[in-house]
Amino acid sequence: MDKLIITGGKKIDGEIVISGAKNAALPIMAAGLLASESLILSNVPHLKDVTTMMELLGLLDARLTVDENMEIHIDSASPGPHNQTPKIHAPYELVKTMRASILVLGPLLTRFGKAHVSLPGGCAIGSRPVDLHIKALQRMGANIIVENGYICCDVPGGRLHGADIYFDTVTVTGTENIIMAATLAKGTTTISNAAREPEVTDLIHCLNAMGARISGINTSTLIIEGVEKLSGTKYTVIPDRIEAGTYLIAAAITRGRIRLKKVVPSTLEAVLKALEKTGANITCGDDWIELTMSQRPKAIDIQTAPYPGFPTDMQAQIMVLNTIAEGTSTIVENIFENRFMHVQELARMGANIQLHGNTAICHGVEKLTGAPVMATDLRASAGLVLAGLIAEGKTCIERIYHIDRGYERIEEKLFQLNANINRQA
Ligand code: EPZ
């Protein structure tokens, strides 16, 4: 299994291009199931999760090609001339490797009237139930039973109908599944307390380009008027705000300088405000962000929240800043029940953190020391990479397949930024 070896102490210095957003690309690829014409996507990041989604779409009878410009073409064939049954089975073997596979549920149901999708199961950060997805689809007319670990659905009469959906917990993929299901349903669907993440907005823009009728964009109340069919389109996925935030923190904690190109600063407001409070100097243009940090960061209190609040996917990364910041800080994780797996590993590097339920109290120390550590989930691993950049000596991070799911060529980008890092098979 690959590992990353990092020797700390060098300042991040340089500029990089930010890749397309994993959490926008995955739902948008699933939307390829909604149309029988080509959906052509550019700026899709080359990540394990993207390959897994391509594999899953292939099992569902979509034809996928990647052209010379690295654009992904998705052609979801209509059921054949002899009306052979469309492929609607998403197997456990594949779904267990990527929870976002649940995003094929809404498209399959609304396009083909049937779906047989494995329950994604939990992961390191929490139980990750999908009860809100299921309840909402039932309100739209789907018959759903969960048996032998599968979500087995069919739609009497073959077509979902619009409904008023209220999510009592903000759910990103739940919102995305219902948006996609509603695009071809009969009548109008309203989603209240919808997720407003930029990746949800990106999916909506793509669906509207395919002929969907979705309004209320960027608000927590979405209205979707069902249409008879959707067409293909060419679409460019937005840049990854979490990748961008991760590299900004790399520059801040090493007291360096970084310029990020091909980003959307407005999608990072909560992160930029937090970093400015730690003492970072930040300037932004239309599609770039520059950060310089000349002194030890000041500690900052954080509460994770649904967008536009501070993203839970940046919690491990900002915690690393707090471990070596001046002062004591609290980080409250309000989204997932077990998203402090990085704390024990950081403690092995000399961090001083106390856990009280969903609250971490960090007492800033002068420095961390390198150690062999283990990645447990995608963003915790990114946090360990950041810790390795500032720790004295060598840090060896094992199980970095977690990182490869969400960060494109992380060691190349960090090497380009003057870090002392290499990947070892
Ligand atoms: C999405 O996960 C992201 N994944 C996650 O990013 C991200 O951390 C999360 O949203 C929160 O922003 C993708 O977009 C592919 P949720 P998702 O449904 O949709 C509870 C990463 O690192 N809930 O918004 O699965 C749930 O338990 C990944 O890139 C229910 O109770 O998260 C959680 O406490 C990690 N029932 C809260 O809602 C449901 O049916 C928010 O979860 C659904 C969710």
Image (tube, grey):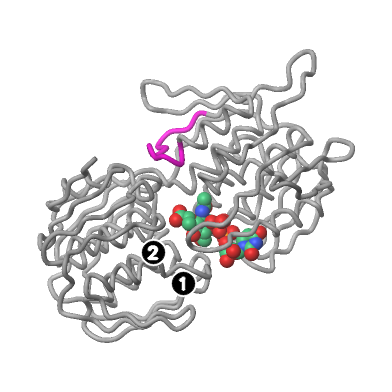
Is 139 inside the magenta-drawn segment? no
254 on left or right of 87 = left
Q: Which of 140 and 425 is in front in this view?
A: 425
Image location (x, y in percent) of residue 413: 22, 46
- Under circle 2, the secondary element is helix
- In the picture, the quarter occupied by the C terminus is top left
Q: Name the residue: 74% across, 56% down.
A: 190
**Label located before the other in sequence (2 or 1):** 1
Q: Which amino acid does label 1 sit on?
A: Thr
Q: In this view, does 245 lie above or below 319?
A: above
Crowdedness near tag 1: few (<14), some (14–19) or many (≥20) residues, C-alpha within 10 Å: some
Marks 2/1 in contact by CB < 8 Å: the verdict is yes
Q: Which mark is residue 314?
A: 2
170 on left or right of 322 = right
Is 45 inside the magenta-drawn segment? yes
Q: Which of 315 and 375 is in front in this view?
A: 375
Q: Nearer the viewer, residue 148 or 393?
A: 148
Which residue is under mark 1? Answer: 304
* Residue 325, quarter of picture: bottom left
Q: Which amino acid does label 2 sit on?
A: Met
- In the picture, the quarter occupied by the N terminus is top left
Q: Magenta stretch? A: 40-50
**Image quadrant, ligand 1:** bottom right
Crowdedness near tag 2: few (<14), some (14–19) or many (≥20) residues, C-alpha within 10 Å: many
Q: Is residue 258 above or below residue 97?
A: below
Q: How many numbered marks are there?
A: 2
140 on left or right of 231 = right
How far is disc 2 from disc 1 in space, using C-alphas? 9 Å
